[in-house]
Amino acid sequence: MTNIRDPAIAKNIIIKNILLPSDAETFIVVDNDIGFLARTDPFLDADFDLTCVVCNNGHGPAAWKEPGAFHAGLWRTHREVLEKTLPPWFRLEYSQDGTKVKRCLCMHFADKVKSMGFTVGHAGFAHHDP
């Protein structure tokens, strides 16, 4: 695989070229800068269609205020979610002049998943060390 510097493109390539062609029904995706802590069991047990862990993502506690907040450092979903939520799954949204990120790539994915009637949430904790 090439060294992809755009995180949205990299995540979309993983879904398209690795996850969907596999025989798996459930997927856990972990960024290489996530460290597991003892409190990841709630993440594995949560009953959301798209689940992530709470981690220090650089945006502070406000990033986790909403029950459906989603950030893609460590996440889990099912094949049906990825198949019904068409690409691009992840996408950065920029200001009109292209100088600021208006919305993170994670929220684009979470909103698409919610719009298809699936549930999104977070449970458990992990350490994120970008």
Image (tube, rainbow, N blue to C red):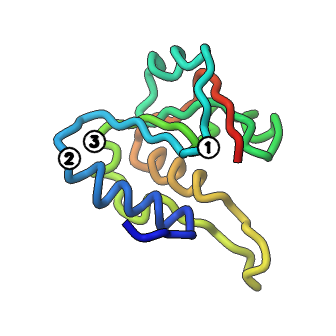
In this picture, residue 39 sits left or right of residue 20: right
Disc 3 target residue:
79
Q: In this view, does 101 lie above or below 110?
A: below
Sequence-earlier tag: 3 or 2 = 2
Disc 2 target residue:
22
In this picture, residue 50 sits left or right of residue 74: left
Q: Where is residue 29 in the image (x, y as percent from the top left)?
A: 44, 41
Q: Which residue is drawn at 60% across and 66% down?
A: 92
Q: Which residue is drawn at 64% across and 28% down?
A: 126
**Mark 2 crowdedness (10 Å alpha carbons): few <14, some 14-19, many ≥20:** few
Sequence-earlier tag: 3 or 1 = 1
Sequence-earlier tag: 2 or 1 = 2
In this picture, residue 75 sits left or right of residue 65: left
Disc 1 target residue:
33
Residue type at the position of mark 1 = Asp
User: Which label is found at residue 57?
Assistant: none
Q: Are marks 3 and 1 in contact (CB under 8 Å)?
A: no
Residue type at the position of mark 2 = Ser
Q: Which residue is drawn at 58% across and 29% down?
A: 122
Marks 3, 2: nearer the viewer? 2
Q: Where is residue 107 in the image (x, y as percent from the top left)?
A: 60, 52
Q: In this view, does 28 lie above or below 1?
A: above
In three-dimensional space, the C-alpha distance between marks 3 and 2, rounded to whole angstroms, equals: 10 Å
Quadrant for the N terminus, please.
bottom left
Q: Is residue 116 above or below residue 24?
A: below
Q: Which residue is drawn at 42% across and 65% down?
A: 88
Residue type at the position of mark 3 = Arg
